[in-house]
Structure formats: C-alpha cells, structure tokens
Image: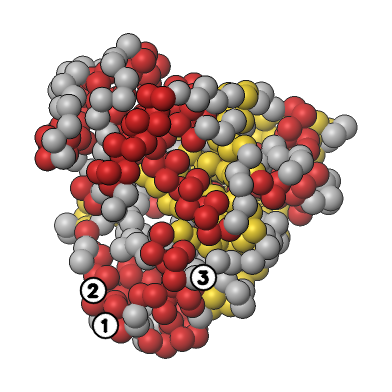
Amino acid sequence: MSAVLAFDFGASSGRAIKTFFSKGALRCEEVHRFANVPVEKDGTLHWDFEKLVEEIHAGIEKAGAFDSLAFDTWGVDFGLLGKDGALIDLPVHYRDKRTSGILEKAASVMPLEELYRETGNQILELNTLFQLFSICRMPLFQKAARLLFMPDLFAHALGAQSACEYTIASTSQMFNISKRAWSAATLDAFAIPHALFAPFVESGTAIGTHNGAKIVAAAHDTQCAIAAMPCTQDAEHAAFLSCGTWSLLGMELDAPVLSAESFHAGLSNELGANGKINYLKNIIGLWLIQECRGAWAQQGHAHSFDELENLANHSMPLRCFIDVDDAQFVSPGDIPEKIINYCKKTNQHVPQSVGEIMRCIYESLALKYRVAVKQLENLTGKKIAVIHMLGGGARDVTLCKFTADCCNVPVVAGPIEAAALGNSIIQLVALGEIAAIDEGRRIIAGTEMIKRFSPVHSEAWENAWELYCSLFCK
C-alpha cells in the first residue's frame, strides 16, 4: 500500500488530504484543514506565506508516514527570491489593486490581441505578466534573482529545488502554449529577464525530498481537478467545470485555439497535467456566495451554506440576474449591496431578502455557464454532451441542478475534493503505482461518489436566457 499527501490550496482555505492506494482502490482522509486569510501590509494585499508554511508543517505532522507530497494552488501568483534564495517580501494577492487600469498601458507595449496569440491566456489584469509589469521599476523587483509560482514556492520552503512546473507557468500570460516555452517576444517586450525563471519541470516530477518522502511537482489546482475528472468515455464531447472560488469551464483539446474570435470571447488555453490543452473560460464562482455569507455574518446574521441554499430554493425563480464577471464583483466588499445596486441599475426586480440574493447568484452563475458552453461549442465545433462538475460546487445540489437545466446538458457532479484527488493521482503516477492519469480517472470513476443531474428543459429558463442575453451579451 502506498500513501501520498496532497496539499490543496484554495483562495480562502487549504487542506491536507492523505490518500491511500491499495489493490486498485483509493481511500482519502482529510488530516488537516485551515483558513487562507490574506493580510494587508503597507496598503498592499498579501498572502500570509509564513502562516501557510506553519500550516503545512502541521499537516505533515498530523499525516504520519507517507511516500510523497505535493502542492497545488491557484494560478498567476508568485514569490520573488533574492540572490540568497530567501523570500524578499510576502507574495502579493491577485486581488490587490496594483494592477488596476494596467491593461491600457500594457496594450501600448504589445497589442493585446498579439499578446493573446503569443500566450493563449485570457487578458486579465491579475495575470502574472501584468503583476510584474506593475512593479518592474520598483526596488523590490530589482533585487529579485528568482520567481517561483506559489506551489513551487511552497515546495521550495520544504527544501525542494527551484523549479517551474509547466501547468502553473501556463497561467502567467508569458508562456507560449504552442511551443511549451516562455514567450521570448512577450518577455522582451515587457523587459522581464529570462533568467528570472526556474527550469521547467513536467507535472509529476520529483523535485526534492522531505523527511524521506519525495516532493513531487503537481502545481495548478485547476489542472489537478481536471486530472480527477471521472470521464471514461467520449472525452472529446465532455466539458469540465472546476468550481470553487472561481469557476473554470472548458474542454480538453489537442491544440490551442488562438483565433481573434477566441480572444474576443475571453477564453484561455492552459496546459493540462496530461499534456492536453485545457481550453476554458474563467468565471467568478463560489466567491460570490462566500463573500455574501461573510457580509451577512458581519451584520449579525450567521448562515450555514446549507441554510443559504435552502433560502434560495424557497425564493421566486428567475426574477433578476447579474453578470457575475462584472469588475465590481471581483473585489471584496459588501457583495449583497453591490448585487442590489446592480439590479437597480439594470432596471430589474431588486432582490431584498437573503434568499432572493442567493437565488440571483445561483441563476446568474448557471446563465454565465451557458454563455461559456455556447462559446466553446462555436469555437471548437464540438457539441458538449456532458458537464463534469468538479470541486466544491459538486456538493451544491442547487447549482448542479440549475446548471443542467439552464445549459440543457447532463451534469455529472464529483468528486468534491477533485484538486486533491488529482494531485494524489499525479503523485501515484510519479511513484509508479499508476500507469497514467487516464488510469487514475477510471479508478476515481469506480470509487468516488458521483451524482448525475439530468436536465429538465423549460420555457422559463429559455425566457430567462433571452433576457440575460439582452442585458449582458451585447
């Protein structure tokens, strides 16, 4: 029997999952869970790296014996190391305002459509390239000898070699997805030194040891979640929906899509752990519910997630919607009030109760998912036959049901801990226990709790879709 330890970091929490593999079966055990709370320092929003490293050591101690460990995290963010190999400052949070308004300046350096053809990433202010562009003239950047993305930085803190795993690099807006190399044209245009980056390693590469256990590169949480997709047939027509703080809805392809139409649709090409191209749409996800819950708690009204879901289900359906990706919903701060004002501004029914606001979020997410499904189908020429809901969203029956009904596509929900399971599969491949990610997917399909939601086509959803498109699809 082999045991591996997966550290899965989300934007609001982290967990250490120990996975046992024996006789072709997986058994997972959560050994440690902790909050991931950003800190503000000198007006800048940072990740509390030292605290997170303490949590890693706590997880290792609780886990007992294991053969390997690996880290997966959100994309784009990084730490800068000095010549002595020490962290110069706390890593900055992607929601920090240092990149606000930077796209206009970036476009004067390199036209954004050209940048898209070079890198394949959706143009977002929070991408690594624009974070670096915002600090390239600061003393902090001048001191930097090495950049490590967050999962590689955590591994380095445990003594692993400096490395840059491919899947996390592909989120940066600096990686040429066609060539599987840094985009020299992009780095040179933005005056970013090539030597700043560690050598590339494949997902599943052993990059060090800690107390006798191998440290394996797993890297981007989305790609880990997709590695755990229990898709055993007709993968060509399957979509994934990795739903946590962010929702990533896309398809696995053999080659990137870098057309002008793809650029204008805001779709991203990222590298998967299995070498496939994950062609996807970044959509705000459960962040909206998390922020609303926090805002109501500050007002003295604490609600569990189950209570919020129940209140949504007891509210009138399909009365008002938001574009969940509107810039005002990206930043923290009283999301319920922002939703109310947004509905007023767009001349819709104005939600007042907790249930109405929650219903608005659920339905708006489902409608945005339908936008992404249509874009993917149009740009790939492939009809989506099933959506695999992965991650935290898979436990939310309402979200799964609304997604199936709105998109008129079956939703297969699970596994819930998809990123940690994919991380574990990558480690087991590295240990030689599993032949490949496809074998791991078959094992997950046979052992994990998977639920299926068949769509119920209704005129009400079609009318809602027409209204949504008239408001937000111009």
- What is the crowding at mark 3: few (fewer than 14 residues within 10 Å), some, or many (at least 20)? many
Q: Is residue 82 above or below residue 95?
A: below
Q: Is residue 409 visible?
A: yes
204 sits to left or right of 348: right
**Kind of element beneath mark 1:** helix
Q: Which residue is mark 3?
A: 258
The location of residue 303, given as percent across then percent down, is: 30, 17
Residue type marked 1: Ser
Residue 269 x, y percent position in the rendering: 53, 62
- Residue nearest the viewer, comparing 107 with 224: 107
Q: Which residue is at a point 40% across and 28% down the rendered structure image?
A: 461
Q: Are marks 1 and 2 in contact (CB under 8 Å)?
A: yes
Amino acid type at image mark 3: Leu
Q: Amino acid at mark 2?
A: Glu
Q: Position of residue 380 (x, y in %)?
A: 58, 58
Work out whether mark 3 precedes mark 1 in sequence or the reverse, and give the earlier one.
1
Cα distance in 3D space between marks 1 and 2 = 7 Å
Judged left or right of residue 408, residue 192 is left
Residue that label 1 marks = 108
Residue 43, percent across and down?
17, 57
For numbered disc 2, what is the local secondary structure?
helix
Q: Work out which quarter of the rendered image holds the N terminus and state it.
A: top right
Question: Which numbered circle lies on residue 104?
Answer: 2
Helix, strand or loop at label 3? It is loop
